[in-house]
Image: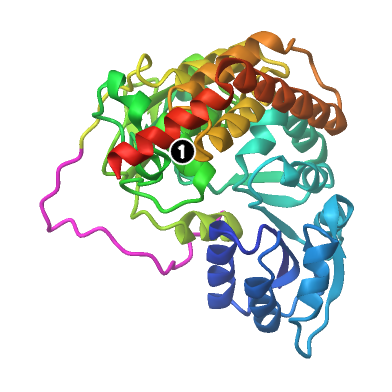
Amino acid sequence: MTLLTLLGSTGSIGTSTLDVVRRWPERFGIYALVAGRNTELLARQIAEFRPQVVVVADETALNDLRGRLGSHIPELGFGAEARVAAARAHAAGFVMSAIVGVEGMEATYEAVRLGKRVGLANKETLVASGKLVIEAMRASGSELLPVDSEHNGAHQCFRAGRRDEVAKLILTASGGPFRKTPAEALAKVTPEQALNHPTWKMGPRITIDSATLMNKGFEVIEACWLFDLPPKQVEVVVHPQSKVHAMVEYTDGSIIAQVSATDMRMPIQYALTYPERADAPVPRLDWSESATWNFEAPDFKQFPLLKLAYEAQETGGSATCTLNAADEIAVDAFLAGHIPFPAIAATVAETLDRIPTREPRTIAEVLEIDRASREAARRVIEARWGNKAATEAVLIGKTRA
């Protein structure tokens, strides 16, 4: 039996992972559950899966969790050191990295460094520290299996030929809720509108990143590291139906596509059982029903963050770490009503100009760059928008209400 350390057990990927584990009790079990502050759900997960170790965000969450536990009391911990220990534990044969943000980066890196099989659903690990993680993977022999639907689809497509036969990788994007919105109208977009994604149900930050296409930019960066490709060999196409997740074009002109229903349990199970393809509890596409699939080029002028992501990966070094940190601060400011929607891209661009690019040699240096970039992004927002932006956002909301 393979025991898992699940980083981010109460999030959408975490709960889907547990659903897969639930279906395969003879093959998979839970060594450690690592979560944030959702102790109510975490307590139910502990009662069902009976992990040996449980880690939460801080001491307050830990005390709250203690009051919710029943008869099964696992080893309890909180904070970054406990997260890393849960990922490093010898008993954990598989680590699912599903914590949103840089909080999961160090634990994921340590699992890779120790040669464990890692299911990667955390974008920030490769966006912020891709070179370090890939170097550790090559040194340790770790298997890094992508769980995001696009990269998971690409991983499957790459099995059709040799790597030197690949011409390019094509990642699909839904286009988000503003695919057809005129650029001049984006300044009046409200957080409620931006959070209304037409295809996927996700957390707030990733939903906004999908609306700006920054999420796809992050996926381009991830793909470059995962599949050892330069940015010019990774193409993005908008595919609103989200049925084709990735395509690989080979040198002979053949294109291999991975197509499936939009259910994250399929790529999660693929990562857990690779190279086997086991029966998965996901909807099947009905080919007897007529359907139309559309593909179109992304508009880089309307969605400049996608272009910034390509440029940051070309620049290399810490540029992509700054890109991610500035975006997170800008998204938070937009969701709070402090800046308008187009200001997300403007904040990221100015922060990239302010933070010098360097080559981090340790995860600690990456985290230092992340902190400096976040502070720079906050200063950009204060200098350019300040209280006026917050007032304008409130007025826009009242007008649309």
Say if the magenta span includes residue 277.
yes
Q: The magenta stretch spans which residues?
A: 275-293
Residue 136, position as x, y percentages in the image: 80, 35
Q: Position of residue 284 (x, y in %)?
A: 29, 62
Q: Counting other residues with Cα less than 10 Å from the Cα at mark 1, is it few (<14), some (14-19), or many (20 or more)?
A: many
- Closest to the observer, 3 or 43: 43
Query: Which residue sits at x=57%, y=37%?
Result: 332
Q: Is residue 8 visible?
A: yes
Magenta span contains residue 233: no
Q: Which residue is mark 1?
A: 208
Q: Nearer the viewer, residue 234 or 6?
A: 6
Task: Tell me the quarter of the image containing the N terminus.
Answer: bottom right
State left or right for residue 132 relative to residue 267.
right
Instruction: Determine if residue 173 is in view.
Output: no
> Is 30 placed above or below 37 here?
below
Measuring 46% from the left and 38% from the top, which residue is drawn there?
208
The one nearer the camera, 348 or 76, is: 348
From the image, give the main secondary structure of the stretch colored magenta: loop
Give how far across and how far down residue 338 sits, in percent: 53, 32
Residue 156 drawn above or below residue 325? below
Q: Amino acid at mark 1?
A: Ile
Q: Position of residue 306 (x, y in %)?
A: 46, 22
Q: Can you say whether 35 is above or below 50 in the image?
A: above
Question: In terms of secondary structure, where does tag 1 sit?
Answer: helix
Residue at 39%, 20% in the rendered image:
251
Q: Residue furthest bottom?
A: 71
Residue drawn at x 63%, y 22% is 382
User: Does residue 302 appear left or right of residue 361 in this picture?
Assistant: left
Q: Is residue 294 left or right of residue 73?
A: left
